[in-house]
Image (spheres, grey):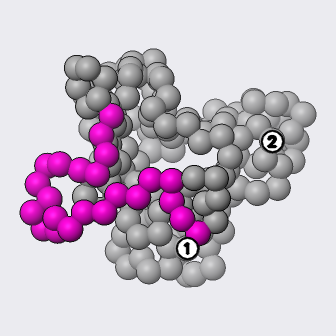
Amino acid sequence: ADDLANGYAIYVDSDNGASFGTGGYFAMYNGTSIVAKFTRYGALTIAGNAAGTDSIGLTKGDISVSDGNVSIASSNITGANVLDISSATTTTKNILDIGDADGLTIGSIANFASNSVDTSARNLVYILNDNALATAAVLLGLKNDSTSDDISIDSNGVSGTSLFIDSENTT
């Protein structure tokens, strides 16, 4: 297939329809098990090698989901981030942009929840400006165009402080 302007190098046609079963269009087998497969509706499954190794690599271009969601179910990860975004060359855009949540009614743009019984000291959300020369950087900016509360703290703990500020500033 030297000219693919209007065609495909590989085209698989199946009229099996609703009785597709557990089979698929394409499978890669390593002699022991299926390591990757395309099944009904173009679903791709990749078995992967081991934690900390790449199962999918994208060197250029974008990943776009037009109708659906992205779900990450992570288990048995020790010493690694579940989602790690590295963008050292981004200068004027947002690294993470959730910009069109206009349909929300009682939902939230983000939800961070932990139900761990571990008593180790930790921050559930941590923001760090790690350069003393970044004097105009603000750690957290909040803007509310409505008349509702700007910050609401609901503390149900039996002890501890609801708001603690530790500052070495002299002014």
Q: Vertically, is 68 above or below 75?
A: below
Q: Residue at x 64, y 53 (%)?
A: 2
Q: Residue at x 35, y 74 (%)?
A: 106
Residue 33 locus on image (x, y percent): 23, 26
Residue 133 lies left or right of residue 4; in this view the side is right
Could you say which quadrant of the image residue 45 lies in?
Answer: top left
Residue 10 lies left or right of residue 135; in this view the side is left
Q: Which residue is identified by label 2? A: 89
The amino acid type of the residue labelled 1 equals: Asp
Q: Residue at x 31, y 23 (%)?
A: 30
Report crowding for label 2: few under 14, some 14 to 19, many 20 or more residues within 10 A (C-alpha).
few
Q: Main secondary structure of the magenta part?
A: loop
* 24 in the magenta segment: yes
Judging depth in this view, the residue of 108 and 34 nearest the camera is 34
Q: Which mark is residue 100?
A: 1
Judging depth in this view, the residue of 59 and 8 nearest the camera is 8
Residue 39 lies left or right of residue 166; in this view the side is left
Asked whether the viewer can see residue 155, the reply is no
Q: Residue at x 34, y 58 (%)?
A: 12
Helix, strand or loop status at disc 1: loop
- Foreground disc of the pair 2, 1: 2
Q: Vertically, is 126 above or below 100?
A: above
Alpha-carbon span between mark 2 and mark 1: 25 Å
Residue range in magenta is 6-28
Helix, strand or loop status at disc 2: loop
The amino acid type of the residue labelled 2 equals: Thr
